[in-house]
Image: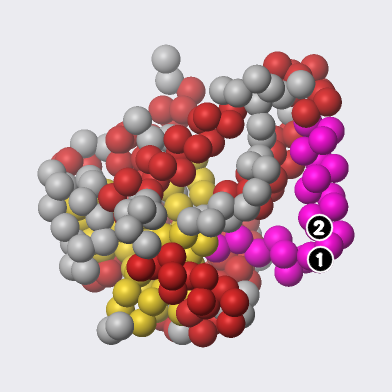
Amino acid sequence: MLPYAAYLRVYEPLVAFSPAERASWAAYAEATDRPRRASALHAEHGEAVRRLLGVSPAPAPAQESPNAYLRRVDDVLYVCPWQSRLRSWLAFSRLRGTTPPKLMERFVPAAVAEQTADDFDRFKRRGGSAALRTHIRSSTWHVPTSWFIPFDGNERWLVIDGENPPGGTTTTRNLIYVTSMAHARRRSARALQIIRRQVGEVAVAADVEDVARWLEEFHPHSLVELDYGGIVNLMDDDELQGDESVAELAAALTGLEKGEEDLAFAMYQRVILRWRSIQLLESAN
């Protein structure tokens, strides 16, 4: 069973990488033993579980992952590195910063935690802020509202019972959206403008701005993907088929823009209530 997490990913074209990285990723794409999309999430999750079940547990890998998610569009290879070590460091830092020390020791021995933090500090000193850029964001138990904004309802690919969406990117039950970086940035900028003009500086505007700023860090010809990941295991087939959160949020923004407040409120509430009911499962027994 995959963790109940969704993922927002950016796939950059090979030209976005250094010459050495281009050669490495091109060779990786041709390798026969690399994890395929259908099993990549399971492989990534398996690596994390093995680290945490070790004696002592390893909050982050000793080396950065050589793996990546790949897409090909019109003979152009797009790469989304796993960056398992960096993402583990960032997640561990957030956990450590929000967990009381005595409780934290139940998860990771103090000496291991200190070593992990020291390793991360050395990494940051060597690479600076640019080294902290991740191609993948994750969210447990729900999809943040701001993640729906870069996409259009027509970009929705629903996969049930082993069917393949256009492009054959996966053979597992899933719900994904894929769009171009140009579309993602334009939709995010429009949404931010509408929210600020009609609602003001609210938390949702800050979340949208955060996503928009993150997207600006990548190559302009990249692809952006929203993957429901393990969240699909919290939804039955009817719920997945009825999930039109992207289209509903777009309708809410259009309603705000046109002054149709009742429509905007109704569409926004549909999205919020749907995901609130799913998120509440985290504390269910």
Q: Is residue 201 left or right of residue 8?
A: right
Query: In the rendered image, which quarter contains the N terminus?
Result: top left
Q: Which residue is pictured at 70% across the width and 61% down the height? A: 132
The answer to which quarter of the image holds residue 77 is: bottom left
| Closer to the camera in the image, 248 or 156 | 156
Apparent side of residue 147 relative to residue 235 in the rendered image (left or right): right
| Magenta span includes 92 | no
Q: Please report the residue visible at 43 percent of the width from the left and 47 percent of the height from the top.
A: 6
Residue 240 rendering spot, x and y as whole percentages: 23, 46
Q: Which residue is mark 2?
A: 124
Residue 72: image x %, image y %? 32, 74
Residue 122 magenta-highlighted:
yes
Q: Residue at x 45, y 35 (%)?
A: 46
Residue 116 is tagged as: none
- Provide the major secondary structure of the magenta segment: helix
Q: Secondary structure at mark 2?
A: helix
Report the magenta residues as a range.
113-136
